Image (cartoon, helix red, strand yellow):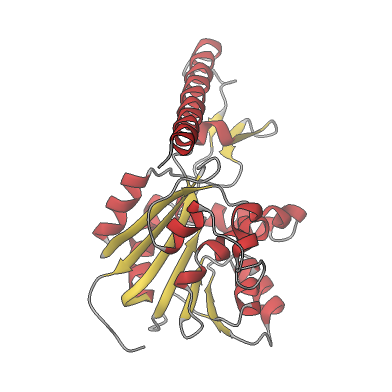
Amino acid sequence: MNVAANGKATQTAAVATGSAVRARAIAWFTRFLDRMWFSRDDPARPVRLRWTPELMDQFWDGISETRLVELNFSRLGGRALISAVSHLLPKSSRVLDFGAGDGDLLELMCARGLRVAAFEPSKGRSRNLQNRLVGQPGFLGTVSAKSTESFDVVMLVEVIEHILEEQFAATLELLARFTRPGGTLIVTTPNNEDLDLNMAYCPVSNTLFHRWQHVRSFTPDSLVALLAKCGFERVAVHQLEFRDDLYVPYDEMWGNPSVALPPHIVDLRANRPTYTGSGMGLMYIGRRLGGTHET
């Protein structure tokens, strides 16, 4: 690496470190003020919402009926994500979008000629995606938790941070079952998110809740350790920002694949860990242990 590149890498790392330090300082100060203003027994102290499966279903069914669906991760960053993992999505593969939401990612993958299925526990969102994708070439339909199917690639996109504690073990078991032995798992989630800084406050009920129903946060190491317990072997973990301009111009379908590839695209396609943009998102690439398996 030349001196200029070395300097740029150092500068990027310094910016990321500075951002993390500022975020921790803000979180500490927020908690400090909270302790100053409210005693534990003060009735004016906001109450943290305790998410239940019923509340979670109601939240996402409600979201599905609003314009907030325009802020879905897959609608805003779906093309960037698919461009980043296109080397892991051969057209011969069967792909499952686990927690498919309203079908934004599925629609993009169908347009690329991929064969894709959906698993979506929210009834409202599942209804939305089925209405949206019915008749689309390549759409394999929806699967339920009772399905015995397995897939070459399973994508868990901005889902793992939403799973409630009482559902966590069963969901991870289901995730492993849907991924064929030797198959690929792709997981994205916020990188070391400070959950407190993404809270919303309801003045009617005096309640605090995460604006997107996140209940857990991951670092690269904690995500790798968790998925290893489920039978997945790490291939690579990337720290990325899912912006179209960082990936789509080099995509074989949406961009110009003949242009010179920047280092982060070269590293992604070689499954070498890379840090791109703000690094605010994690992308885990794993392999299901157990050899080959016919689906």
Residue 12, how many percent across, how many down? 49, 34
- Figure check: 79 above or below 39: below
Q: Nearer the viewer, residue 166 or 93?
A: 93
The residue positioned 47% from the left and 70% from the top of the image is: 87
Describe residue 133's horizontal placement relative to residue 151 as left or right. Answer: right
From the top left corner, tell me how far across and down residue 225 is, in percent: 27, 51
Q: In this view, does 83 lie above or below 178?
A: above
Task: Kindly identify the residue that appears in the image at 60 percent across and 52 percent down.
Answer: 246
Q: Note whether residue 238 is visible.
A: yes
Q: Is residue 230 left or right of residue 78?
A: left
- Residue 39 against residue 199 in the figure, above or below: above
- Residue beneath the point at 67% across and 79% down: 133
Residue 52 in view (yes/no): no
Quarter of the view holding residue 123: bottom right
Rendered location of residue 99, percent (x, y): 52, 65
Quadrant (top left/top right/bottom left/bottom right) for the N terminus: top left
